[in-house]
Amino acid sequence: MPLTAADVKFTWQWNIDPVNASIDAVSWELISVVEVIDELTVTLTFAAPTLGWFQPFGSNLGVIYPKHFWDGKDATTANIEFASAPIGTGPYVVEEFSPNDQVVYAANSNYREPGKPFYQRVILKGGGDPSSAILAVTTTGDWDMAFTLQIDPDAIRAALGDLGDIYGPPGTGVEKIQFNFTDPNTEVDGQRSEKNTPHPFLTDLSVRQAIAMAIDRQTIADRLYAADPGRNMLAGLTQYESSNTSWAYDPDAAAQLLDEAGWVLNGEVREKDGVPLKVRYATTNVVQRQKVQAVVKDNLVAIGFDVELLQVDGSIFFDGTPDNDQNFTHFYSDMQMYTDGATSAFPLNYMKYWYAGPDGENLAQASNQWTGTNKTRYQNPDYDAGWVEIASLTDPAVATEVFVRLNDIVVNEVVEIPLVQVVADRYVVQSTIRQENIAVSPFGDIYWNIANWNRNA
């Protein structure tokens, strides 16, 4: 069926309906009315003037859903079906989907541009390790490309063959450590990390500051990423890069800060009022991240922490299924690490990650099936007020000031630690493919331009 104005209206209605727990609701809530004029025309009325008017359509989440797919079906059932077999107007359609394994796409015979796409079939394979993926592309030639390669410079040099090359344009992503502001070891009403149950020691600013000072970001950045150490959470967008933040590697000062806050050594581990500084530190099972974990663990043990490392398969860690308590939205550890960043030139959605909302509605909890984007469960009325203010601003200079202020709260309150500013996506591609057409952007996934991918003549 063709795309129509009714689909646009339906998409707006679907995203603002709390039942669907859309992670892009904040973009669509900028619109108060969608009026269908005719099959190909809609009129949008915004709730208030906003610089982010393009948000519903301009980010990597800006997609239009086909209304007919939901017609006559139970809404929840249709949501589940659509997640495994989505329908769109792009260059490819899903042919076969095997969860946690691979997806096979076939060329869309109804694609809007004649003669495109240039490949009849695309196979996306999950799993494996970065070194093997690089070898499969540039040495054996089994695959045409591999992407999202978390791998250190030495491993790249060891794995890279002569059939292709590796690329990594600048991006907005930050490899970061998040702190859990709630207690992952106490169960309340059937869930751990309940929003009103504070963490026994990570709610102490001195502890978070000491951890930040104890971590050797320079070594991590130089040896494992060949990138710059992280300083801001809102990075890669020049106008929003705060100059008010700084970082320092100073384990002696970190230890002194803990002493002054009453966290004293009892043997090799510090404690206060019988509470030991014991942290469970989780991330994905990527070798590069395991190396980062090792550095961080050594740094923290040196100042009196007991650190347990946990690695979770990426397909589980990033799986948003409500009953998956090992994923990053449940956040049932004390610290967790992954990469995230702004996906739009007006990063309202990204900055919602630290917005709690009325009665903590945006905190990841059982009540919202852990779809609340505030995974740390950090609550700060000043931050919330600033985030709400941005949505209705029309002066770019004022919006920039507020974005910077929100970034500074997150960094200076040590809600999260930006370890490294990473590339938009590190990927390897065979020399037979016209690499410039891949055109990786900080604001979209690597496939946004796949209709134009082709081979060199």
Image: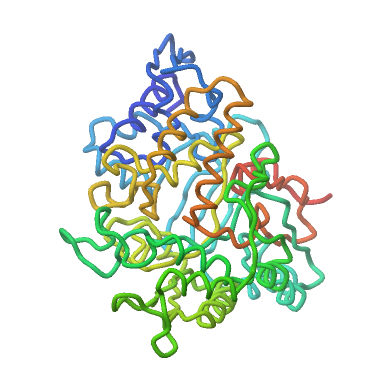
The location of residue 333, given as percent across then percent down, is 37, 68
Furthest residue to the left?
189
User: Which residue is found at the position 56% from the left and 78% from the top?
Assistant: 299
Q: Nearer the viewer, residue 433 or 305?
A: 305
Q: Vertically, is 35 above or below 442?
A: above
Furthest residue to the top?
37
Furthest residue to the front?
260
The location of residue 44, given as percent across then percent down, is 45, 15
User: Which residue is found at the position 46% from the left and 25% from the top?
Assistant: 2
Furthest residue to the bottom?
267
Q: Is residue 395 left or right of residue 380?
A: right
Name the quadrant containing residue 167.
Answer: bottom right
Name the quadrant containing residue 345.
Answer: top right
So how many labels did they put on this image? 0
Q: Which colouring convention does the figure follow?
A: rainbow
User: Which residue is found at the position 54% from the left and 27% from the top?
Assistant: 52
Q: Vertically, is 22 above or below 9?
A: below
Q: Nearer the viewer, residue 130 or 353?
A: 353
The location of residue 318, given as percent across then percent down, is 43, 60
Q: Nearer the viewer, residue 17 or 302?
A: 302
Q: Is residue 41 left or right of residue 370?
A: right
The location of residue 3, given as percent across then percent down, is 46, 25
Name the quadrant containing residue 197.
Answer: bottom left
Residue 170 in view of the camera: yes
Residue 441 in view of the camera: no
Q: Is residue 59 left or right of residue 353?
A: right
